[in-house]
Image (spheres, rainbow, N blue to C red):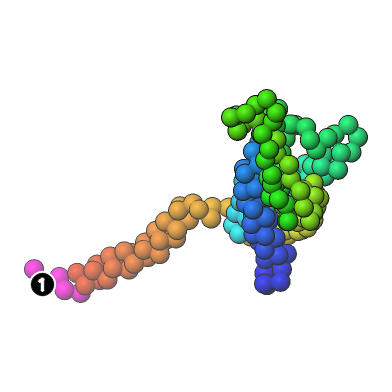
Amino acid sequence: MGCCSGRCTLVLLCTVQLIAALERQVFDFLGYQWAPILANFLHIIAIILGLFGTLQYRPRYVTAYAIWAAVWVTWNVFLICFYLEVGDLSKDSDLLTFRVSQHQSWWSEHGPGCVRKEAPVAGMAGMESHSYVSVVGCSIEYQYIEVLHSATQILLALFGFVYACYVTSVFTEEEDSFDFIGGFDPFPLYHVNEKSTHPLFKQSYLESSALTVKNPFLN
């Protein structure tokens, strides 16, 4: 396949997706967003499987990647609805932290231009853990940053799904004419070596036999 083939394009897409997923995982860890952290972890595994399947001509792995790409699109659509508060969803809820903490997105306090201010709560003097935190001056609200992240993930996943389906169909057609099974099996190599060395032994045996016949009184 050429460098502009669907296989090379899918490898490039998976690489970009992996970088984007790692970047998102870092900021979700900083914000203690446990549900997105788990989803990102599964996403990274699926991307690695897709890369492996594409490079090693494994259509089953590429198919698994394509299925996950569809799931990933659904998850990111949910995140967009969550941060835009569609229906009964609220961006201030603790749904993404599995209701174990009240943490929000890391971007809510560290977005572009944001200034974080803390003020002690009245009647709670000396208790820093009960201070009131206010964030002002943000150039972009954190929910729109999260929506932008999710939209980017959806776009990459859609392209990945299309190219994964294409690459899978190409691999399936090629498997009808060529056998890619056993790429990691050492038996074929051993079998070839065995076939190649056997005639050598046979030829040397015939030569020694002919020499013995021609010189019966050497001994």
Query: Along the horizontal axis of the image, is 15 left or right of 215?
Result: right
8 or 142: nearer the viewer: 142
19 or 213: nearer the viewer: 19
- Please report the residue visible at 39 percent of the width from the left and 58 percent of the height from the top: 194
88 or 55: nearer the viewer: 88
Residue 136 image point, x, y percent: 76, 48
169 or 85: nearer the viewer: 85
Q: Is residue 93 above or below residue 150?
A: above
Q: Which residues are magenta?
A: 214-219
Give yes or no for residue 148 being in the magenta stretch: no
Q: Is residue 105 above or below residue 2?
A: above
| Residue occupied by mark 1 | 218
Residue 5 image point, x, y percent: 71, 68
Residue furthest top in the image? 123
- Please report the residue visible at 79 percent of the width from the left and 56 percent of the height from the top: 139
Which image quarter: residue 163? bottom right
Q: Residues within 10 Å of mark 1 (few under 14, many from 20)?
A: few
Residue 25 image point, x, y percent: 64, 47
Residue furthest right in the image? 87
Residue 192: in sight, yes or no?
Answer: yes
Residue furthest bottom in the image? 214
Residue 210 image point, x, y percent: 25, 71
SS assignment for the magenta stretch, majority: loop
Residue 100: in sight, yes or no?
Answer: no
Query: Along the horizontal axis of the image, is 133 left or right of 48?
Result: right
Report the quarter where the N terminus lies. Answer: bottom right
Q: Which amino acid lies under the numbered mark 1 shown in the image of this protein?
A: Leu
- Please report the residue visible at 73 percent of the width from the left and 56 percent of the height from the top: 113
Which image quarter: residue 202? bottom left
**Under tag 1, what secondary structure?**
loop
Report the quarter where the C terminus lies. Answer: bottom left
